[in-house]
Image (cartoon, grey):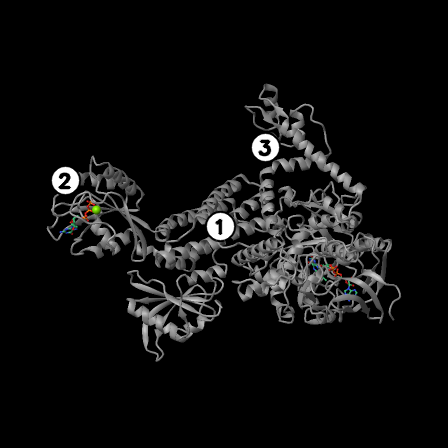
């Protein structure tokens, strides 16, 4: 039947991308429907029971500022919280939390169910219906047709999903959930290029059969810090993880049974992530390593299932059991669910705009693993951008685009739509050119205005953040204009504080730049410096200590922006540009960059080609100006 | 159009050398190689292949070494190869003809460079510099440019690049994968690697000074007391009658300059007023200018008259030459009248007769030798001002990084300095992309929690 209720936005999928897309779209006031294969797995974590981590923590916090749910959700359901890289500079601090997977998904479902403007239905979408290059609705496996103006597709690993355990093969979207067999054909029919990727997961073990005393305990931080800037009450447990090691026997077992691996026997040919290799790969490629770390992580506060991080495998069940039991502490272990590899359809993301809308089909947005990424956080950040833009499309508002110089989200999306990906794409801090500025700690400071202007943040929240910003600026100004003098009291104090004496009048900002100094030490030295909240202290310290480097990055950003601001008009005809090779022309016509900056980031587009383009565009512009004058 | 056909040229035209090179570039050029070369594929990139070039009947033309450079990692960015042949021009010409027969066409002047530019192998300013020089002055510059980017130089660059990549990748692993149990290179070793990178950069900078002479041309100044034959020599070398020759001492009163080639090296030669004490005002100004020219010259030709012995004015010339230049060629002229009875205190002395045009070849060889030592021709690089600047910047950043490592600076900040290093060396080591870095990271480190 044609369903009588008409929707503005339909979100296909209830994973991390789908949840954020559906929530933000509904929160922005447009009528939204989520269609997903299995309601009980809304917000499910297919793989590791953790949120955040290096560079991913950044994404979670950005989603939070843009009005998303991931940060709040983990703050309510985390089992341990940790800031990684605390010993290194603030630019690379990253938050991570172990999650209670069950609590996480239940809370997410609850939030969705209590969201105004959002309906949720358990149905598998088989077809996207488009007319005249515009989406008009979807058809589901129940024969229902839902009409809408915009669609966000977030199918994760489900499209033509195929699971491998040893030499056995099963059709499934994740573990034993049914796959989506038809949707990718419908996408192909719309003209999209679809190919295959693979990933894998680890066996889940029974905690009752693990000798934890033989393992190394890995607790979280004693003073956990929440992800969301909105979280006020925060009281979560600190459940430990455990560290185990493979050994030479483990490796031998794996090597002897490689013929049992679909990856090595040639059954699976698609590409998996290099940063997340299977244990088979690790043992083969890093033959000289005598042991590999395995992190045993709780999946759920109330369950015995333990996730064995570092043991992604697609070896047969028998081999999995055998090599697991060769490890210290796991001699008697029982597998509850085996590890497996999964192969699935994804869409080449260079077919998308920065809004995540498909270039050739109006109203069709794609987000999450379908775009060739991997990871919950990567999915969530795309979900929120696609959801916002789907809603703005309905509301006829300007697209919401996040740039590389503003957020990790911007880096992620720009990489995808400009360069595409050959393996499941994961965020790294090294992908962000301006990583000293795009820190986790200042996420809300740097993005609040953008979020508020787009209507993604309430006025109260914005004002609160704005106040923090002002306080930081004031304090820095104060430190730069408050001086201490080289008298006995000051120099004695300096020595006491483990620092060196001063010989001339010195401002406090300068002292702050000394490695051993912080705001509290300055207070001991200079009378009348007020106590401020720890967050302000931290930001002031970072800003001053890294001032030189931060300024350097700001300059680099200016240079970057210059090229981003050189816009290439939509529908620009590259055939009119003389001197471009056919290869370069082909690439430019395929990606259709919106700016000279983006054009330069397309692989294969040479600096010379960019120079030629700049000259051409300048000529065109000059002519236009002359003609209109 | 340009990426459709295959171009070829003799790349060592005027050099007197034991070998000559024919260079071929274009999509499909390796198929030409297959046709004319006894060694059959595979032709590995950046490898030298030994064999014979044969004519269409299979008769051997020459025994050769062929270096193969595959797209995009060649000077032009296209598939290309260089045939190093034995012997003289005629063999080279036979080989070139054979290449044409197999489907290539003659390259236009500067065409290799043009392709390199269009394929993004060199930037606009470089291409311009190269083109300008080629079209105006000398072909040799082009050969050097080609060799610089395709030959020995690129392997040197590759080494630097790999070292930088390794260090960068390690730094990123330390940041992005804090929980992996990886063993890292010790600080001392990292510092050593940086010291080595710095050393290499410095040596490139030094070789570029030779490149400068070839690209920007060599300035020669002829000095000598009046009437020794300076203007006569200029006229012979340049093949003109640009400078007035008379038997009146003090004929040339100002500096006369003329441009010509010695073995493909663009030269500007300055004929000066004979240096002598004089009361003639005009001549005196000329003499002052001569002294200035002397200071600016790369090479000084100090000229003497064999038919007269050395007098105190000649001694003054000798002193001037030695004081102002470290590259002096002594020339003894008018040997047709009389053999010289004196010995000049210079490393290089050539006896000539301008009248009979004798000894001029020897003089040209001597000058060429001072510009390039043919043995390390392939070490010579030509860099533009920007590139030299970048090199210097790179050298400074190496110093900073060495200090960073020794002080144990935060890896995130070290990361910034590495990016600056890679950026500053973009032109020279080739762009280091994030993908390159990740590649190295995953290849060298077992990552994957
Ligand atoms: C085996 C495995 C191993 C993984 N390993 C890692 C890892 O090591 N590290 C890492 O960071 N990430 C890993 N991931 C990836 C991570 O789980 C995903 O990146 C993330 O969950 C993607 O989120 P998503 O919203 O795009 O899709 P998913 O979370 O997969 O959600 C897809 C949703 O779409 C629904 N759906 C699909 N098709 C249809 C349809 N036709 N109609 C209606 N609904 C549909 C599904 O029911 C599901 O709710 C792994 C995933 C799997 C399955
Ligand atoms: N016999 C003989 N005469 C020569 C030779 N070279 C030059 N002369 C003559 O020497 C005279 C001076 O030659 P120039 O070339 O004008 O000498 P110059 O050094 O330029 O002289 P000023 O410009 O006056 O300093 C002319 O008459 C030449 O013909 C030579 O090799 N042999
Ligand atoms: Mg003269």
Relative image position of residue B261 (x, y in whole percent): 30, 56
Pointer 3: what residue? A514
Observer-nearest of B229 and A156: B229
Pointer 2: what residue? B311
Looking at the image, is B71 positioned above or below residue A210? below
Observer-nearest of A279 and A454: A454
Q: CA distance from mark 1 to mark 2?
A: 54 Å
Dot 2, crowdedness within 10 Å: few (<14), some or many (≥20)? few
Mark 3 belongs to chain: A
Relative image position of residue A15 (x, y in whole percent): 77, 59
Queried on whether the Cβ of the residue with tag 3 lies below 8 angstroms from ligand 1, the answer reads no
Dot 3, crowdedness within 10 Å: few (<14), some or many (≥20)? few
Looking at the image, is A544 positioned above or below residue A285? above
Queried on whether the Cβ of the residue with tag 2 lies below 8 angstroms from ligand 2, the answer reads no
Pointer 1: what residue? B425
Dot 1, crowdedness within 10 Å: few (<14), some or many (≥20)? many
Number of callouts in the render?
3
In the image, are marks 3 and 2 on the same chain? no
Q: Is residue A206 visible?
A: no
Regarding mark 3 in the picture, which secondary structure is present there?
A: loop
Q: Earlier in the sequence, mark 1 or mark 2?
A: 2
């Amino acid at each position: 039947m044609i369903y009588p209720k008409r929707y503005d936005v339909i979100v296909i999928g209830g994973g991390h991308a789908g949840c954020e897309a559906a929530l933000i779209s509904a929160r922005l006031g447009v009528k939204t429907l989520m269609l997903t294969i299995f309601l009980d797995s809304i917000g499910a974590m297919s793989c590791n029971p953790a949120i955040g981590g290096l560079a991913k923590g950044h994404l979670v916090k950005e989603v939070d500022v843009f009005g998303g749910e991931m940060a709040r959700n983990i703050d309510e359901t985390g089992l341990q919280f940790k800031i990684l890289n605390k010993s290194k500079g603030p630019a690379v601090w990253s938050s991570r939390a172990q999650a209670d997977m069950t609590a996480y998904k239940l809370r997410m479902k609850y939030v969705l169910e209590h969201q105004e403007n959002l309906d949720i239905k358990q149905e598998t979408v088989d077809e996207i219906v488009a007319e005249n290059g515009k989406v008009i609705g979807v058809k589901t496996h129940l024969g229902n047709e839902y009409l809408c103006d915009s669609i966000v597709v977030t199918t994760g690993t489900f499209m033509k999903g195929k699971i491998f355990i040893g030499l056995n093969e099963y059709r499934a979207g994740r573990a034993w959930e049914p796959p989506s067999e038809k949707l990718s054909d419908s996408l192909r029919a719309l003209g999209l290029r679809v190919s295959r990727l693979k990933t894998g997961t680890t066996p889940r073990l029974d905690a009752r059969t693990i000798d934890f005393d033989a393992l190394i305990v890995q607790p979280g931080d004693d003073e956990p810090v929440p992800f969301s800037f909105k979280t006020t009450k925060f009281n979560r447990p600190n459940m430990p993880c455990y560290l185990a090691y493979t050994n030479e026997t483990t490796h031998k077992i794996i090597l002897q049974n490689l013929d049992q691996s679909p990856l090595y026997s040639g059954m699976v040919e698609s590409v998996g992530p290099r940063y997340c290799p299977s244990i088979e790969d690790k043992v083969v490629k890093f033959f000289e390593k005598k042991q590999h770390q395995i992190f045993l992580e709780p999946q759920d506060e109330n369950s015995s299932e333990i996730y064995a991080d570092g043991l992604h495998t697609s070896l047969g069940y028998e081999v999995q059991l055998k090599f697991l039991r060769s490890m210290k502490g796991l001699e008697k272990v029982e597998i509850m669910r085996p590890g497996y590899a999964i192969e699935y359809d994804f869409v080449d993301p260079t077919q998308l705009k920065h809004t995540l809308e498909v270039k050739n089909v109006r109203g069709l947005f794609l987000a999450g693993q379908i775009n060739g990424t991997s990871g919950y956080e990567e999915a969530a950040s795309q979900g929120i951008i696609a959801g916002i833009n789907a809603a703005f499309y309905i509301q006829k508002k300007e697209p919401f685009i996040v740039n590389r110089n503003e957020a990790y989200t911007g880096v992620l999306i720009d990489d995808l739509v400009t360069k595409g990906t050959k393996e499941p794409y994961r965020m790294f801090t090294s992908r962000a050119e301006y990583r000293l500025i795009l820190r986790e700690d200042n996420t809300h400071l740097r993005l609040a205005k953008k979020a508020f202007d787009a209507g993604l943040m309430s006025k109260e929240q914005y004002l609160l953040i704005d106040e923090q910003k002002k306080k930081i600026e004031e304090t820095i100004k104060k430190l730069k204009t408050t001086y201490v003098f080289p008298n006995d009291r000051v120099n004695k104090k300096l020595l006491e504080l483990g620092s060196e004496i001063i010989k001339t009048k010195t401002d406090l900002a300068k002292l702050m730049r000394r490695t051993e100094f912080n705001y509290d030490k300055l207070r001991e030295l200079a009378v009348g410096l007020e106590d401020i909240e720890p967050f302000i202290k931290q930001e002031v310290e970072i800003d001053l200590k890294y001032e030189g480097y931060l300024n350097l990055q700001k300059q680099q950003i200016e240079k970057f922006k210059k090229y981003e601001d050189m816009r290439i008009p939509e529908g620009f005809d590259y055939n009119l540009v003389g001197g471009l090779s056919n290869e370069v022309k082909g690439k430019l016509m395929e990606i259709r960059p919106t700016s000279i900056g983006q054009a330069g980031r397309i692989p294969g587009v040479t600096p010379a080609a960019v120079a030629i383009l700049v000259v051409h565009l300048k000529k065109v512009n000059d002519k236009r100006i002359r003609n209109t004058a | 159009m340009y990426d459709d056909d295959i171009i070829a040229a003799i790349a060592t035209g005027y050099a007197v050398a034991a070998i000559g090179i024919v260079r071929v570039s274009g999509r499909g050029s390796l198929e030409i190689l297959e046709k004319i070369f006894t060694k059959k594929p595979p032709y590995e990139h950046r490898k030298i292949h030994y064999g014979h070039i044969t004519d269409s009947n299979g008769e051997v033309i020459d025994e050769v070494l062929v270096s193969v450079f595959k797209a995009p990692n060649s000077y032009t960015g296209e598939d290309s190869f260089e045939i190093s042949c034995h012997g003289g021009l005629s063999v080279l010409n036979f080989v070139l003809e054979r290449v044409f027969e197999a489907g290539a066409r003659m390259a236009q002047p500067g065409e290799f460079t043009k392709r390199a530019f269009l394929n993004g192998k060199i930037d606009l300013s470089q291409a311009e510099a190269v083109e300008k020089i080629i079209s105006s002055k000398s072909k040799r510059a082009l050969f050097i440019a080609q060799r610089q980017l395709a030959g020995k130089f690129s392997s040197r660059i590759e080494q630097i690049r790999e070292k930088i990549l390794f260090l960068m990748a390690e730094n990123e692993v330390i940041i992005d994968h804090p929980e992996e149990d990886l063993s890292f290179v010790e600080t001392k070793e990292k510092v050593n690697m940086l010291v080595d990178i710095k050393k290499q950069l410095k040596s490139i900078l030094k070789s570029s000074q030779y490149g400068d002479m070839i690209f920007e041309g060599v300035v020669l100044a002829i000095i000598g007391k009046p009437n020794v034959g300076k203007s006569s020599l200029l006229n012979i070398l340049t093949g003109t009658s640009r400078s007035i020759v008379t038997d009146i001492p003090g004929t040339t009163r100002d500096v006369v300059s003329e441009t010509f080639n010695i073995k493909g090296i663009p030269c500007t030669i300055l004929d000066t007023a004979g240096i002598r004490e004089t009361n003639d005002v005009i001549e005196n100004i000329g003499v002052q200018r001569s002294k200035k020219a002397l200071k600016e010259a790369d090479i000084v030709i100090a000229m003497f008259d064999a038919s007269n012995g050395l007098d105190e004015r000649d001694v003054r010339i000798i002193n001037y030459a030695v004081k102002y230049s470290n590259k002096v060629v002594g020339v003894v002229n008018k040997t047709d009248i009389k053999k010289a009875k004196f010995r000049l205190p210079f490393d290089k002395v050539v006896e000539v007769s301008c009248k009979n045009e004798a000894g001029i070849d020897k003089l040209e060889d001597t000058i060429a030798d001072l510009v390039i030592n043919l043995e390390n021709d392939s070490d010579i690089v030509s860099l533009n001002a920007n590139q030299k600047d970048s090199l210097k910047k790179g050298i400074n950043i190496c110093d900073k990084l060495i200090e960073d490592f020794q002080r144990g600076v935060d890896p995130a900040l070290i990361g910034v300095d590495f990016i600056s290093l890679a950026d500053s060396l973009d032109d020279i080591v080739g762009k280091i992309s994030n993908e390159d870095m990740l590649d190295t990271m995953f290849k060298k480190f077992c990552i994957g929690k």
